[in-house]
Image (tube, coloured by chain):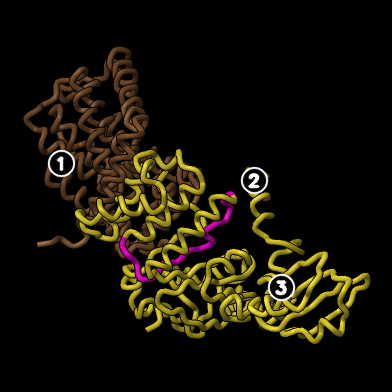
Chain colours: A yellow, B brown
Amino acid sequence: MPAVRVDDARKVYGDPPEGVVAVDGVSFSVDEGEVFGLLGPNGAGKTSLIRILSTLTEATSGRAEVAGVDVGEDPRGVRERIGLVFQEPSLDNLLTGRENLELSAALYDVSRRQTRERIDELLDLMDLAGRGDDPVKQYSGGMKRRLEIARGLLHDPEVLFLDEPTLGLDPQTRERLWAYIRSLREEGTTVLMTTHYMDEADALCDRVAVIDQGQIQALDDPEALKRELGGTVVHLRALGTSEDELAQAPGVEDVQAEGEGTFVVQLAGEVAQLPAFLRTLDEVDHLEVTTPTLQDVFLSLTGRHLRQGEAEGDGWTEDYQRMKRAE
Amino acid sequence: MKIPYLRPLVGMWRREATQYVRERSRLVASIVSPFMWIAIVGIGIERGLKPDLGSGLNYLDFIVPGIVAQALMFTTIFYGVYIVWDRKMDVLKAVLVTPVPRSIVFLGKVVGGATQAVVEGTLLLIISTFFVDILWLNVVPAVAVILLTAVLYTSFGLALGSFYESFEGFRITSTFIAFPMFFLSGALFPVVDLPTWLTWFTHVNPLTYSVDALRSLLVGGQQAFSYLTSFGVLAGYTALATLVGGWSFNRMEA
């Protein structure tokens, strides 16, 4: 039984014909224990999908199941089985971290005996053990996010939804949060996350659905998505070799000479081909290995960059700087 | 036997209670304004105008129960601002995504608001003893009136608040509703010999019944309505307000 199954879901806000189509016939399924990413620009329909799956809104048409329960038929059954971490913080600032978790434990009817144990365990896991009794208003952005993830896990959900888990966090916090999400996978929790950061999807997800304008454009593991686009690219400068010689080397698909001993070599397949190729070279002045990024994948699938004005590099840095400026 | 949803309900009540204890200004604010009504308006009118109320009560006797009821109404209607707050802070969304039914979410907030009102009411009764002689024998039915009034107006305030996304919008509407209810409840002057259209209003105004019952229970004097009528009307309005509140929470979008 898949942890999540979506079958031709559509979500239209407002009435046709003026209605805005947020989700336009999406189907996919997430296996148990998988970390699954919905990758796409803002407004692609990711959050709408999460809202449908977490019963916060009803799909206009189509079916969706979470942990084997139909979201339309038994929303309460779904709610019992999921944890949800929102994009915006949703904690009570007047309460302490522990009190926020206690409230959630009460709402999910976690037994009192278990509650204490579980809260200690989660505060520990999220590195908040020493700060549990401080009011949340004294927490940093990263601490709040970690507390929310702890809250999402409190009742041992079968599926955890993370909506843009690292939006607006500083670089160190972001790295640490990734480590926590990886540790969730090791514990066997199914995670369905949205992100518009390529590197995040790449770093965390077993499989990624690239979503744009309410539709899934591609769905595969990040490596496969990149492989489909093209293998490994090696930029090298080696005076003692020639274009013909390089073309004979193992795994080489294409060689382009750029003059003065500089070549761009395209290797088929994954990086696995790289050592064999490198062994055929005996003198190299300069070497640079690049792989297609998910950014390239997105570009080739949609003909658009993930965000307007974001020509190169990761959108995350820009977002972070933008949010810093806004503060 | 396990009572369903008791733990979520207690959890929500604890949250409200913790907030109340941490924000002492809430309690202080809820006491200051009725204190001024009694100490300034009450004493001022009693000494300055020496009104003849014809029922053996002086003006301070008259106004104290009215102000207690009035203060409860204002606090509890304005308590609806906390649902606007919860929505604004997105705390509401985190609650609505849990398996707890909306009716329980509503009930949790009502119990939280009513608790604060009863604390406030008790404090006001104690403060009142500095101004008037309270008939302590009647304190149990008086607290029952306080409780009914609190639940009634908390439900009403929360139902109203569930329609608002901004504090200002809620504040304007609730003030617009609360003041006429206060002025036409008999809290400040007897609602006799009024023009017909005002009499009509005083009779549909639930606060009239709270004031009337509370006054005869706390300081004696003549009742306009029998206890049976007052309790009946208040219970009816309370039932209606909780139903409307439950419905309004059900239709709320997260």
Residue denoted by label 1: B144
Pick the residue in front: A316 or A272.
A272
Q: Is residue B127 left or right of residue A12?
A: left
Between the C-alphas of marks 3 and 2, the distance is: 27 Å
Amino acid on which the number 1 mark rests in the picture: Ala
**Is label 3 in a helix, a strand or a loop?**
helix
Residue denoted by label 2: A324
Q: Main secondary structure of the magenta part?
A: loop
Task: Select label 3 or label 1 by which is in front.
Answer: 3
Q: Is residue A55 visible?
A: no
Q: From the top left corner, tell me how far across and down residue B76 is, in percent.
A: 32, 41
Amino acid on which the number 2 mark rests in the picture: Lys
Residue drawn at x 39%, y 51% as measured from the top left: B160
Residue denoted by label 3: A296
The chain ID associated with circle 2 is A
**Which residue is situated farthest in the right direction here?**
A260
Q: Over which residues does the magenta segment extend?
A: A155-170
Residue drawn at x 25%, y 56% as measured from the top left: B8
